[in-house]
Amino acid sequence: MDVEARVRANVDRVRALLAGADGARPIPGSDWTVAEAGAHVVSGARNYVELFRGVPSPVGDISETAAVNASHLAEYAERDPAAIAADLPGTYDEVLAAYREAGPDAVLQWHGGLAVTAADNLGVLLGELVVHGWDIAQGLGRPWPIDPADARAVLVAGLRVAPVMVDRDKARRLTGTMEIRLRGGERVSLRWRDGALDVGEVAAVGQALSDKADCVISAEPVAFLPALFHSSRCCGKVRRRLGGGPGGPGRGSTRRRTRGRRRRGGRWQSWSS
C-alpha cells in the first residue's frame, strides 16, 4: 500500500471515530477537546493543499506552529463531530489531487523555509491523521491500533523535517551521529554538529548506512511514533546518550520498546527504555 492509499484509509478511520462522538471530551495531556482535534485534522489539511500548490508554509519559525494552528481553527469554526467527519473525505480528496498534480518529487517550502519533497510532505500529513486519530481515541477511551507500516512511513517523513524542530540553544553542545533503526523497516542517519541537525542517509530494509554512528537507537515504530510527536522527554535521553548534557526527566511511552547503543572510548555501551 502506498502512502496515498494509507492517507485514504486513515481518513476513513478518523471519520468513523468522530461519527457520533462526544466532542466536548478532553484529550489527555492536551488543551484540545475531541472536537477541536477533529477540526484541526480538517483545517490543517487545507494548508497542505496550498503547500502542494507551491505556496510557502505560513509557519516561518517552528515556534509559530501553535499560533498558526489556532488561526486555522478559528477559520474553520465547525465543532460538531458528525459535521467534521462529513467534511473529511472532500477535504482530503482536494489534498490528494493537489499532491498528484505536484508530483512526489516536487520541492516545497515547508515550515521554517525547509525544502522538502511532496512525498515527504504527504508522509507528514499521514502523521497528522495517525497521531491525532490516536489523540481522539484517547479522549474517547476507544482503541486506535496503528499499522506498523503507517508508523514507519510517518517516522521517515517526520525525521526528514526534524531539522527545523531543533532548539538550537538547548542543543548547542550536541555533536555526533545518530542512527535510528525502525524495526522491520528503514534506517535513518541524523548528524548533529554543535546543535545543528542534518538528515543523512535513509537506508531501505536490509541495507546498512555508510555513516559511522555514535549512538544507535532501535525503536518499535508504533511505540516510538507518539513518543516522538508528543513527548520532549525522549529528547533528553538522546542528549545524554550522545554526551550532550542533561535532559528532561522521566521516560517516554516507548519504555522497554526502545534500545540503543552509544560509543564511548572506542567501546559500545548498551541502554534500553
Image (tube, rainbow, N blue to C red):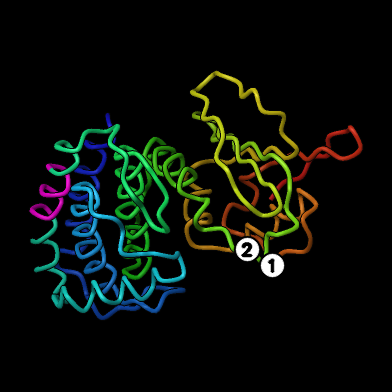
Q: Nearer the viewer, residue 162 or 248?
A: 162
Residue 91 magenta-drawn? yes
What residue sits 31% from the left and 69% below the top?
140
From the image, tell me which residue sits under label 2: 233
C-beta proximity under 8 Å, tags 1 and 2: yes
Q: Residue at x 23, y 74 (%)?
A: 73
Could you say where residue 167 lies in the image, as x and y percent from the top left? 59, 63
**Picture coordinates of residue 164 (x, y %)?**
49, 55
Per the picture, the main secondary structure of the magenta-coloured stretch is helix
Q: Is residue 177 above or below residue 225?
A: above
Q: Is 43 included in the stretch rendered in magenta?
A: no
Q: Quadrant of residue 122?
A: top left
Total residue callouts = 2
Kind of residue indicated by mark 1: Gly
Q: Residues within 10 Å of mark 1 (few under 14, many from 20)?
A: few
Which one is in front, 155 or 218? 155
Task: Give the position of the N terminus as an image quadrant.
Answer: top left
Residue 195 relative to residue 27: left or right = right
Measuring from the top left, give residue 117's x and y in whole percent.
34, 39
Q: Around disc 2, counting alpha carbons within 10 Å, would you say few (fewer than 14), some (14 to 19), or many (20 or more)?
A: some
The answer to whether 246 appears left or right of 133 in the picture is right
In the image, residue 37 sits, relative to residue 172, either above or below, namely: below
Q: Which mark is residue 39?
A: none
Q: Secondary structure at mark 2?
A: helix
The numbered mark, 1 or 2, whose residue comes first in the sequence reads 2
| Most distant residue in the top direction | 206
Tell me the kind of residue under disc 2: Arg
Asked where in the image residue 72 lies, by quadrant, the reply is bottom left
Give, as a single range, the part of the protein colored magenta. 89-97
Q: Which residue is mark 1?
A: 248
